[in-house]
């Protein structure tokens, strides 16, 4: 049995027409016919019914189609593995990363990891933290880097880092060496508190803030990069992980306001995984040397 026969069969099953199959495979239509006849002869049964210019799978054809796909998948997987080997890759590692984590220190960390482990081919999926658990469970990715802990019985959650959460406000142009510190109560009472830009701590924090400031006005903004922009434009203030505003604070575009009324939460970063194979162990060990 020739692999090309199977490839032609699958294409014909998809297109339902020998002419279109020939065009897609860049072969002649008579060649398509020969491939199908050879495969039918090998299997000892008809795979297609002819209906004018169209073709339709027989019951045998429908049953064989799933097996043909498996054969092609095995072939393509083998070719991909050999191609990786020829390029110097010997291992694959797929990561599901939350947008927030991907936007902070991770690019630098990945650059260092790839430099140290050139044999590992890395693929990255940007996935919201709430969806990472399912992606790991379904084996769409090998490791998830999430802002949320997973409590699923089949998964393991490893706390990588806890970042402090800070109250951030727009820079109002004052000279902070000579000016009085900005008052937390004043800034929370005078504008909007931008909330729910982090999946981990806002539900509890909102309740705490409302207890101390019952009249506070809140505005939900689901993305941290939009929150930063809104704060800079004077639309409000927010409690953000320090790593997400480090550059803005250093450049003076935003300012940190000291919070004394109540203790602030931490922003957690977790690794979520289903298996603990060597590749995962090495990657997590490497991550442990960096702060998120």
Image: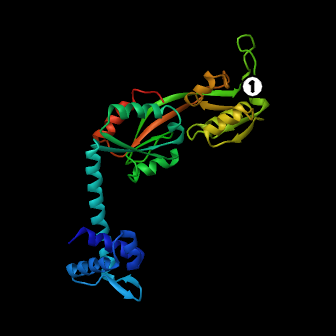
Q: Where is residue 202 in the image (x, y as percent from the top left)?
A: 61, 38
Give the vertical position of 72 relative to 236 (above or below): below
- At horizontal 26% and vertical 46% (from top left) the residue drawn is 86
Left or right of 177: which side holds 271? left
**Splitting the image into 4 quarters, where does residue 168 fall?**
top right
Image quadrant containing the N terminus: bottom left
The count of marks equals 1
Q: In this view, does 224 lie to the left or right of 62?
A: right
In this picture, residue 169 sits left or right of residue 119 = right
Which element type, helix, strand or loop, lies under badge 1?
helix
Look at 32% across and 34% down and name the residue there. Answer: 117
* 276 in relation to 168, above or below: below
Which of the two residues, 143 or 21, is positioned nearer the viewer here?
21
Which residue is under mark 1? 185
Q: In this view, does 249 lie above or below 278?
A: above
Q: Nearer the viewer, residue 119 or 238?
A: 119
Q: How far across and how far down the image is residue 129, in percent?
A: 51, 44
Question: Can you tell which quarter of the image residue 199 is in?
Answer: top right
Q: In this view, does 44 lie to the left or right of 189?
A: left
Report the colour scheme.
Answer: rainbow
Q: Work out which residue is located at the far bottom of the displayed protein and give it.
A: 52
Label 1 crowd bin: few (<14), some (14–19), many (20+), radius 10 Å: few
Residue 67 sits in quarter: bottom left
* Residue at 75% in and 23% down: 172
Q: Nearer the viewer, residue 245 or 205?
A: 245
Question: Residue 72: horizontal and vertical position, in percent?
Answer: 29, 64
Q: Residue furthest toward the top? A: 178
> Residue 242: image x %, image y %?
57, 27
């Amino acid at each position: 049995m020739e692999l090309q026969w199977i490839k032609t069969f699958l294409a014909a099953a998809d297109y339902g027409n020998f002419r279109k199959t020939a065009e897609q495979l860049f072969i002649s239509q008579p060649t398509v016919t020969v491939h199908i006849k050879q495969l039918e002869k090998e299997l000892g049964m008809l795979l297609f019914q002819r209906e004018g210019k169209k073709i339709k799978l027989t019951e045998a054809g429908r049953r064989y189609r799933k097996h043909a796909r498996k054969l092609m998948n095995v072939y393509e997987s083998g070719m991909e593995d050999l191609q990786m080997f020829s390029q110097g890759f010997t291992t694959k590692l797929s990561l599901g990363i939350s947008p927030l984590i991907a936007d902070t220190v991770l690019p630098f960390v990945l650059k260092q990891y790839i430099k140290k482990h050139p044999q590992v081919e890395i693929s990255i999926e940007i996935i919201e933290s709430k969806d990472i658990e399912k992606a790991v469970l379904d084996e769409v990715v090998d490791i998830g880097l999430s802002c949320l802990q997973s409590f699923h019985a089949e998964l393991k959650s490893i706390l990588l880092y806890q970042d402090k959460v800070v109250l951030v406000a727009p820079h109002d142009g004052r000279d902070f060496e000579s000016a009085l510190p900005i008052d937390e109560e004043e800034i929370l009472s005078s504008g909007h508190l931008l909330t729910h830009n982090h999946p981990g701590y806002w539900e509890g924090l909102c309740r705490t803030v409302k207890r101390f400031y019952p009249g506070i006005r809140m505005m939900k903004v689901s993305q941290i990069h939009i929150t930063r922009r809104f704060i800079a434009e004077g639309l409000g203030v927010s409690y953000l992980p320090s790593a997400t505003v480090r550059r803005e604070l250093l450049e003076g575009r935003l300012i940190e306001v000291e919070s004394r009324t109540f203790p602030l939460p931490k922003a957690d970063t977790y690794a979520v995984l289903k298996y603990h194979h060597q590749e995962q162990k090495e990657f997590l060990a490497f991550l442990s040397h960096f702060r998120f």
